Image (cartoon, rainbow, N blue to C red):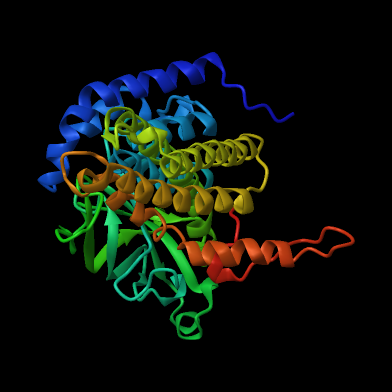
Amino acid sequence: MLNFDLTEDHRLLEQSVRDWAAREIAPRIHDLDREHRFDRAILPQMASLGLLGISVPAEYGGVGMDYVALGLASEELEYIDTSLRVIMSVHVGLNSLTLLSWGTEDQKQRYLVPQAQGRKIATYALTEPSAGSDARGIQTVAVRKGERYVLTGEKMWISLADVADNYLVFAWTDLDKKRQRDASGMSAFIVERSFGGFSSGTLKEKWGILAGSTGFFKMEEVEVPRENLVGREGEGFKIAMFALDQGRYTVAAGATGLVRACRDASVRYAKTRKTFGVEIGEHQLVKEMIAQMESDYQASRLLWLRAGWLKNTGRRNTRETGLAKWFATVASERAAADAVEIHGANGYSDEYPVGRFYRNSKGAVIYEGTREIHKIMQADYVLAYRTDRPARCELPAWAGGAQGR
């Protein structure tokens, strides 16, 4: 039975994350953003709260909470700043939860356990300089040589690229299928920063999420042990799409938190700023923008909660997770733009947080499936169903319709 009531554990988690972020991060986030500085000290603090292994079972070093808990944490973190939620997306959603479903027992013990405990930081690496939405356009190759694979290639726009210890990397293992753009020729690997031939760097000229770490890394004949192959050869694309289902979920919940942050900042300002002798909150068009934020917040939260419920019950959720991600990220961009408008000239100033909200909101409508791709995905879901009876919906592979195990 679908139930949106939070458990006592959920409420305690929500409050503890909210209190920590307000106490430890909110007073410093303005300076971190202006300095374009990622504070690595945040990571052990998040680990101490159990956030880096929040939805990983206790037997693998995690806290063992459910997907709703992961969503709640993501929403509260992005309420303060998107850079905090990004950590949850790549470390927990895209990497650790993927290893939980696809990794061998050996891989779980060697990699998942220390990641869930926060002793190692992990990320996800699919995007390349010439391949974003077109995953089949990646150029990284992995050549089997005895008991090892030799990886060569470059990954770009990777969150925590210059911070992570472990990387979930996607590469072609079948060069004939690479030439044919047949995704069944891709495979997934766990690559360690310590492997020879690996180097990374930080992207400095970003427009938003300036307090976060985003970068690139290169692999020049990096030797990866055979036992670091995730799944079987040829399952890489399925694994990549499975991972995106988890990552998109955290993005949806996080964007919901950003909508709420825009709403709260706008309400505070509307109650203090006066024009024409009255608080600007009394003006009809300001009320309209705040009302839109409230409706977007409530709808976004319901969408990610439903996706989380489906994940908790083990049901297929690619459609619902994609819808939540699309709706919430578009809503957050609209809320941020309106928040800047409500603040007027002050919204264009760095004195108020809404400018940072606006800059941060733009990234989420691009990564993990652009708004345009998600629009097409949702249309394809509807068009794949007959009007007289439901039918199985098959999305084009590029749209991320493949589901993991």
In percent of width and height, residue 5 lies at 61, 22
Residue placed most toward the observer, 173 or 181: 181
Q: Residue shown at 42%/35% (left/top)?
A: 75
Q: Is residue 403 visible?
A: yes
Extreme left residue here?
Answer: 35
Corner quadrant of residue 228: bottom left
Residue placed most toward the observer, 363 or 349: 349
Residue placed most toward the observer, 201 or 106: 201
Q: Residue shown at 37%/62% (left/top)?
A: 147
Q: Residue shown at 35%/65% (left/top)?
A: 127
Quadrant, the N terminus: top right
In percent of width and height, residue 157 lies at 28, 61
Extreme right residue here?
Answer: 388
Lateral position of residue 57 relative to residue 320, left or right? left
In percent of width and height, residue 39 lies at 16, 38
Q: Residue shown at 38%/63% (left/top)?
A: 126
Q: Is residue 56 visible?
A: no
Corner quadrant of residue 16: top left
